[in-house]
Amino acid sequence: QVQLVESGGGLVQPGGSLRLSCVASGSIFRIHAMGWYRQAPGKERDLVAHITSGGSINYADSLEGRFTISRDFNKNTVYLQMNSLKSEDTAVYYCNAQITVWPRSGEYWGQGTQVTVSS
């Protein structure tokens, strides 16, 4: 009923930038929040950033202000601007959304996009 499709991942050198996008499609009544998580090899999936329909934002403490999340819920889209990338940012980045498909609300995940930071 709902699909999340991420784009924008790839290989970047340390200190570089990438912008991830995630578009939600399907029988969407309302998007309550969208966000990004990441999972490095051998590690758990952790929150990167989260934004609600009202504009409230949470970031992982470890990001040190390098990442910026934004959203255009009219386009069912969330973005993650990643600057000053470090090797430890290498991970699969997953889009997450809390969406109402009338009459029920649920949590949805994208398939993930690989971000590799390496020289």
Image (cartoon, grey):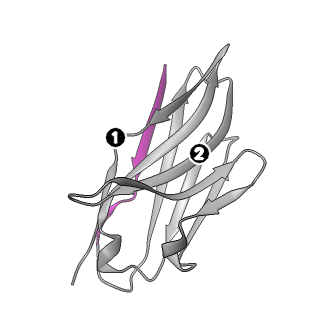
Measured as percent of width and height from the top left, residue 58 is found at 63, 60
Disc 1 element: loop
Residue farthest along the right direction in this orientation: 54
Q: Residue at x 32, y 53 (%)?
A: 44
Q: Residue at x 43, y 37 (%)?
A: 109
Q: Is residue 108 left or right of residue 54?
A: left
Q: How dense is the environment of label 2, judged by Cα within 10 Å: few (below 14), some, or many (20 and up)? A: many
- State the residue position of label 1: 111
- State the residue position of label 2: 34
Measured as percent of width and height from the top left, residue 40 is found at 28, 60
Measured as percent of width and height from the top left, residue 22 is found at 49, 47
Measured as percent of width and height from the top left, residue 16 is found at 39, 82
Disc 2 element: strand
Nearer the observer, 84 or 63: 63
Q: Is residue 43 left or right of residue 19?
A: left
Q: How dense is the environment of label 1, judged by Cα within 10 Å: few (below 14), some, or many (20 and up)? A: few
Nearer the observer, 30 or 25: 30
Magenta segment, prevailing SS (helix, strand or loop):
strand
Q: Residue at x 21, y 59 (%)?
A: 41
Q: Earlier in the sequence, mark 1 or mark 2?
A: 2
Callout 2, which amino acid?
A: Met
Report the Cα–Cα distance between label 1 and label 2.
15 Å
Which region is colored magenta? 1-11
Q: Is residue 117 left or right of residue 80?
A: left
Say which quadrant the C terminus sits in: bottom left
Q: Is residue 6 magenta?
A: yes
